[in-house]
Image: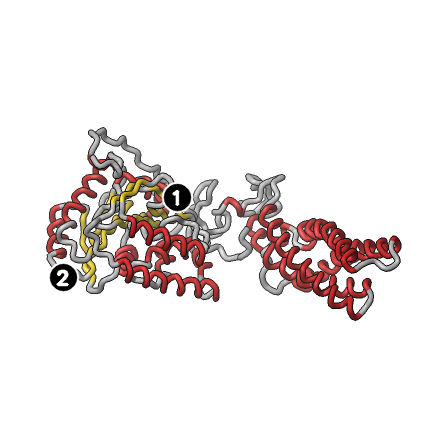
Amino acid sequence: MRTDSSPGTLPVREHLPAAGAGTPVLDVVIPVHNEEKDLRPCVRRLHEHLTRTFPYAFRITIADNASTDTTAHVAGRLQAEIAQVRTVRLEQKGRGRALRTVWSASDAPVLAYMDVDLSTDLNALLPLVAPLISGHSDLATGSRLSRGSRVVRGAKREFVSRSYNLILRGSLRARFSDAQCGFKAIRRDVARVLLPLVEDTGWFFDTELLVLAERAGLRIHEVPVDWVDDPDSTVRIVRTAADDLKGVWRIGRALATGSLPLDRLARPFGDDPRDRRIADVPHGLARRLVGFCAVGVLSTLLYLLLYSGFRVLTGSQAANGLALLVSAIANTAANRRLTFGVRGRRGVVRHQAQGLVVLALGLALTSGSLAALDAATTEPEHSTELAVLVAANLAATVLRFLLFRAWVFPEHGAPGAQLSAPAFRAGDQSAPGAVHPLHDPVGTRGDCGPPRAHGTGRPWEDAALRLPPVRRPLPTRTPGPSDHDPRDPR
């Protein structure tokens, strides 16, 4: 459960409505550099596919990255011929720069991009953007490495791609499977906050976008794609791989030092179902138990080391008391911050005092065990003392967790829980002047309940509170080349 008291800067996700005339729901960007040959067939094929299958208004934006051939001329003709096509000219190269420029200026609530070679089968486009339109996800990305993907490409590119994504998993703990697939989409409200945090302007832009979104807790939807390698691709694999590794180092260092303000991407409290309090359902028990066990293992090791050191200088009872005191203070501080998520100095003295009371109970268990051992054996072995203390500490650990959860750090004591009205059960709004935990505190509509009267202040989001999505039947068609498995040589 979140423990910060800020409502976040992102609105609650909503199902997007069908926009009015001239206002597209989807803006597909095609970044190009010297693509005079492939641009026209790509745009026409994409336009025909969207017209036939996409049930919302759309736009296709050609982002010309400082082309020196006739790409600009071809883009201009396409803009004149097709109403849904527009072109943007940039004087500097860089796919990331092009996407940042176009996405930042677009008025469409869903923003996507794809490579001009159309290596990705277009049948994956609607599954890519549907979770963003419905409000289920924040970003979506195609994956050539998931189990359901069907891919045709050379061994060299396959090796480089899998190695790169393995590096991301090992160094940045990335959970997405394919960072560099040129087939992605993002909600505009998320892009408005996330893009200023992305520094790269080249090929690493995709990876940085996904890593920051994942670390901020945003939901990323992966779509298995059918993908056929373009033999005429102009991407320089070695140079791109070197730049990507530099980017991995930069992002890893920024995450380690905490210099990235990822808290800007927080959703309003109550948007995440884990924020909700439900009657008779323990909140965050599994996560807290795992964290408590990890802290407990480290505390036990610290305790045993301290006891062994103090035992050389003093008797067993005194050594046990000193070791338990030091390790208990460290244990309370670690559990306060890591297990129960309490930040700041407020209440730290009270928490440590209560922790010392818990320490006294643990001391009674361990001291009683040592006393029983001394009564049973005149001069017990040191290893026997440690074994008895380990068993006693296991019992004390269970008692400590129960007391920490119910008394020292109760559920209603967490700062974030105060926002969810702990006196309520789910669905109970009987208290006067109370805010239901499923309603966000900034005035937008939450997961349940009617919209607030004053709205969100964003026109297309206000409309989303009232208008249902447009559903129109998809036309029937005869199977085309894109319906075949790309691995089929026919």
Q: Foreground: 191 or 245?
A: 245
Q: Foreground: 427 or 33?
A: 33
Q: Do the residues labelled 2 and 1 touch (CB within 8 Å)?
A: no
Question: Which residue is at a point 20% across and 61% down the rendered structure image?
Answer: 90
Pick the quarter of the image with the C terminus. top left
Q: Under tag 1, what secondary structure?
A: loop
CA separation, marks 2 and 1? 40 Å
Amino acid carrying mark 2 in the image: Thr
Taking the image as shown, residue 344 lies to the left or right of residue 32, namely right
Question: Which residue is at a point 42% across and 48% down the rendered structure image?
Answer: 219
Pointer 2: what residue? 68
Question: Which residue is at a point 73% across and 54% down the rendered structure image?
Answer: 390
Horizontal and vertical percent position of residue 288: 60, 50
Pointer 1: what residue? 135
Amino acid carrying mark 1 in the image: Gly
* Within-10-Å neighbours for mark 1: few <14, some 14–19, many 20+: some
